[in-house]
Amino acid sequence: MRRGRRGRRINRQLPFNLRAHRQKRFSNRRQGKLAPSIRANRQLELRVVSELTKIYPITDIYFEYIKADVDLTSGRKGAKSGKGFSPVMVGQKWAIEQLSQLATVHTRFGWQTSNLRKHLRLEKSKNKAEQSPESHANDGIALACFQFLDYLPFHTSNGHGYDWKGYVKVTNAPFAVIKRPPISRRQLHLMVFSKGGKRRKYGGSITRHGFRKGDLVSSPKGIGYVSGDTEKQLSVSDTNGQRLGQIAVSKIQLIRRSNGLIVSH
């Protein structure tokens, strides 16, 4: 009923900002909502950059800003399906705000990255399941080269146009895959009370021996990451998640605490 009365009160011949309606008392959307899965991916990127700033004196960061028309209902010829685009587009502004606290952030569009990558003669593979520089690293290399190259106009006696100005030499570099430690989250609702009214331990990132899952450790079977524990032992796995063995805690030495990243070459 109230909705009907409001509809009769509003003069729809006027622009929206001139219509009679109650103004909002306060803004209850001061922070943009970010889906947990998207936030986790952005935080992983931020964590990698934060670790790199501890090793290298990073002063500038180049960020590819993706801007795709994914509204198929618009009827525009250039509109595409949101599949593959939407998850990447979400959270870009949040990521740029966070990265700007570490260094100066410059944004480039995808077509600019593509042009420079072709100028540097770097190949690109669209198969993202392929773990190779062509599928994951070459775009990043091209973005970083914007610090030393730019597409600028020129004028000569014979004509005018645009050309790349500057110089950069791309050399070979090691390729590494960075991922999160595979941690099972606690599922207490699935556990059944054991004798004494206590549930068995399941999931979580803390072991009962003072180590955390993802800690880099040295063991008799090699260097690996803590992946689990038993009453007297720790499970140590390699970078691919393959278990090296269950080893007594007394034979394990901590190399580095977990920073939420696992690097495999």
Image (tube, helix red, strand yellow):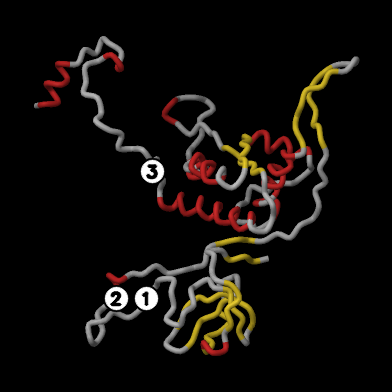
Residue lying farthest to the left in this orientation:
1
Please provide percent x and percent y for residue 262. 58, 66
- In the rendered view, tell whether residue 258 sits above or below residue 244: above
**Mark 2 packing: few (<14 Cα in 10 Å), some, or many (20+)?**
few
The answer to whether the residues at label 1 and label 2 have Cβ atoms under 8 Å apart is yes
Q: Position of residue 34 (x, y in %)?
A: 41, 45
Q: Which quadrant does the N terminus fall into?
A: top left
Dot 2: element? loop
According to the picture, the residue beneath numbered tag 1 turns out to be 202
The residue that label 2 is drawn on is 191
For residue 52, above or below residue 206: above
* Separation of residues labelled 1 and 2 (CA atoms): 8 Å
Seen as rendered, the residue at the extreme right is 157
Rendered image: mark on residue 220: none
Q: Residue at x 52, y 46 (%)?
A: 98
Which amino acid does the dot numbered 3 rest on? Lys
